[in-house]
Image: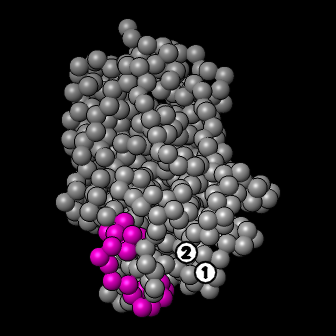
Amino acid sequence: MKKRVCLLILDGWGLRDREEGNAIRQAKTPNFERLWHENPHAVLQASGEAMGLPKGQMGTSEVGHLTIGAGRIIFQDLVKINQAIESGEFSKNKRIQELMNRVKKKNSTLHLLGLVSDGGVHSHYSHLYALLKLAKDKGLNKVLVHAFTDGRDCSPRSGLGFIEDLERQIKIASVSGRYWAMDRDHNWDRTDKTYKVLKNKNTENKNMTAAAVIRKSYEKNITDEFIQPTAIGKFKGIKPGDGAIFFNFRNDRPRQLLERFLERGPKLDWLTMTRYKPDYSVSVAYLPEKLDNSLGEVLAKNKIRQLRVTETEKFAHLTFFLNCKQEEAFEREDRIMIDSWSDIATHNEKPQMRAKEITREILQAMKDKTHRVIFANLCNADMVGHTGNFPAIVTAVETIDECLGRLSQVADENGFELMITADHGNAEELKTSHTTNPVPLILQSRRFKQLNRDQAGLVDIAPTMLKLLGIVQPKEMTGKSLV
């Protein structure tokens, strides 16, 4: 009989013993508890060096899915760029040098856009400072920063400190919360608010510093993520022919804003820190390395039909990142995307999200048996966890647990071995960012009653799945099967 496997990723479901601020421990989760105690399970490292990140750096959905799909530790963009700055290679980067030379030759303005924080998920402020130093060394005297404030991968009011430090060194031309500047769910009205400010179209400049704008926002209880897009001082808008560097290294959230400029203008001399999309006609400072024999690719080579099911918020992670940054689906790879709610500001308003609809699709796929492998992501614990609203996070966790009960039953009835894991922690600590806590792995299987070790990492998931399917692990995967 053909082996069938479902990998269920509970986004943001970390393991932490303390109950204080732990929505996962305080929620009613009878199905997860039953599955954990009745089945083989392990604790997986999902942060820091186990993920190709700096020691102590929290994991992310991007890195988590990439590591699961690769089955090997990949040095992440954050680490690569940090090392380039430390070694001096950054200042010699050919594409950065070329763009700055063109700006200097034309005597145009250089605009630096991106998330100004130390979160290390989408960007790092040290990369901005490295660019500013390089521009100064080049003798560029017209440099403007367009600062996006975080409040999600770091504390909600930490932005003021970053902006105050930055304004001591350089002129900030505009400020915008990431809610507006970095939307990825096709809420174009949010993107357009930032786009119009950057163009300085029908906007009113604030005759105050960026730090003052943030202080005023805090007085109205508007935290970093939601700072209204605001033009500062005498900024007159980005002009045609100017140079622009988008210094975010993670590529999913800058896309919409960049696309507005590429499609509607003004036409700029663009450079992005990493490749945001293969078909963008922009320079790229650091191109991705080609990763052969990802999990999805190995399944395709073995003619196994696979399904990816999730909602909009995590669709890129379950496809592009799980496929090691390949946009196109592999042969025999089918995809189902349920639209995330777009009529809400934050997910605590509907903490159930689309978990039940996703579960319905998974259940049907298990019964149909068209696909031998199902990948799914239930993202409530992460997306609601980011809001810091504890009652809503508890509801989110309990929603997932309800889904687990039905999924485990139908998987068993239809010959699917069920692997339950997470890409990183979040809901087990009451803060708006991810955590460095480990994550679970549960294997519901009639064949295997124990795993060969109880401590492992996300790199070991792909080798384990291939072993369950009876497929030889490729040499590129350095993780080790747990069965």
Residue under circle 2? 144
- Give x and y (percent) for residue 219: 36, 90
Please state which of residues 321 and 6 is positioned toward the viewer in this rendering. 321
Residue 435: which numbered mark, if any? none
Above or below, 10 against 336 in this view is: below
Residue 170: which numbered mark, if any? 1
Q: Position of 469 compared to 333: left or right?
A: right
Region in magenta: 193-213
Q: Counting residues from the N terminus, which is met first, the one under dot 1 or under dot 2?
A: 2
Callout 2 amino acid: Leu
Q: Is mark 2 on a helix, strand or loop?
A: strand
- Give x and y (percent) for residue 121: 53, 58
- Give x and y (percent) for residue 41: 49, 37
Please state which of residues 353 and 416 is positioned toward the viewer in this rendering. 353
- Give x and y (percent) for residue 18: 48, 63
Above or below, 234 against 452 in this view is: below
Question: Could you say which quadrant of the image residue 389 lies in?
Answer: bottom left
